[in-house]
Image: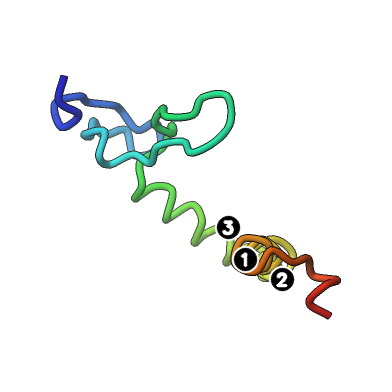
Amino acid sequence: MDQTQVIKRCPCCEQEKSLFDFAIRQSGPRIGQPVAHCKACNIEKQRERKERDLSIYRRIEWPSKLRRTYGITVDDYY
């Protein structure tokens, strides 16, 4: 079946959308399955989360970026 014809409902915005509007899990036990919320709702949730907690970049995003890009930890960086 073509993925453009498969419809999934986003619990956040309560709209029915194509599977292309949902991210696909890249790891974990449900690898290859679509995530619960659509891409647009996930982007909005991430934006709101960053506004509520300004230290999120320093605590979570920056260490993750160092690991992913350079394969080092924050201690290795310093």
Q: What residue do we see at 35% from left, 33% from top? A: 10
Q: How crowded is mark 3: few (under 14 residues within 10 Å), some or many (20 or more)?
A: few
| Amino acid bearing label 1 | Lys
**Pointer 3 or 2: first along the chain:** 3
How far apart in space, not on screen, are marks 2 and 1 (Cα)?
10 Å
**Quick check: 31 left or right of 6?**
right
Where is residue 53 drawn, in percent x and y?
A: 67, 64
Residue matched to label 2:
58
When the figure is inspected, residue 22 is found, relative to residue 7, above or below; the finding is: below
Where is residue 33 drawn, in percent x and y?
A: 41, 27
Q: Residue 11 carries which label?
A: none
**Quick check: 59 left or right of 50?**
right
Where is residue 56 drawn, in percent x and y?
A: 68, 64
**Quick check: 20 left or right of 34?**
left
Residue matched to label 3:
49
How far apart in space, not on screen, are marks 1 and 3 (Cα)?
18 Å
Between residues 39 and 3, which one lies in front from this camera angle?
3
